[in-house]
Image (tube, helix red, strand yellow):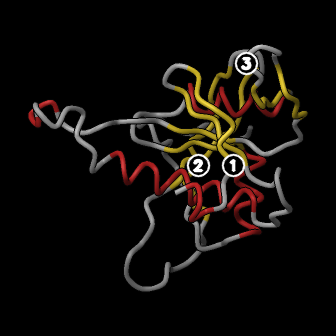
Amino acid sequence: LLQRYEVFKVGTVGDAYMAVTNLACEQPDHAARMARFARSAMEVCKRTLIDEGQPDLGFVVMRAGFHSGPVVANVVGRRNPRYSLFGDSVNTASRMESTSLPGRVQCSEKSAKLIMIQDPEIRLELRGEVPVKGKGSMVTYLLKASRTRGKPKGSKLKRDTKKADGGERRSGR
């Protein structure tokens, strides 16, 4: 998937996987590219057994999140140097993952706006305001599954009257 979408893997920490676009080379569709990568990763998880020896345990369920913004990159460490990213955008992306729903990909409003410009075929669903540690309340969006047949009809940004988690959406932000 990394090669297909030209996404750069930064590293893993525990069960968290960090990847980035628009870093190693200019990618004008960086937000849309990350959305497609995350959606494909989610589809792979849905087909991957937790334990092949115990298929009744079911399939891997993950949640994903991303944000768009500037980062600082540097090599950290002397004995075991590793490439790392720093900055508010990294923290916000991490919060998008941690507040996402199981089996879903959540993104910030900033990323959603970029996606609408970069690839209007990617369908988004307004989740609404989500409390985010260190950020307060943030408006977030969830990626919808890709359509496999035909062209999507109407607007790609679905501003549903209900939030994705089932609660009513408040009018006004």
- Position in image of residue 142 (x %, y %): 54, 47
**In this rendering, would 30 be left or right of 2?**
right
Q: Earlier in the sequence, mark 2 or mark 3?
A: 3
Which residue was labeled with disc 2? 126
Q: Are marks 2 and 1 in contact (CB under 8 Å)?
A: no
Cα distance between the residues tagged 3 and 1: 20 Å
- Image spot of residue 4 (x, y percent): 56, 65
Q: Could you say whether the residue bearing mark 1 is in a helix, strand or loop?
A: strand
| Front one among 54 and 163 | 54
Q: CA distance from mark 2 to mark 1?
A: 27 Å
First in residue order: circle 3 vs circle 1: 1
Mark 1 residue type:
Phe
Element marked by disc 3: loop
**Circle 1 residue:** 8
Front tag of 3 and 1: 3
N-terminal of the pair, mark 2 or mark 1, is 1
Kind of residue sitting beneath label 3:
Asn
User: Badge 1: few (under 14), some or many (20 or more) residues near its Cα, within 10 Å?
Assistant: some
Judging by the rendered image, the residue that carries numbered circle 3 is 80
Coordinates of residue 93 in the picture (x, y in percent): 70, 34
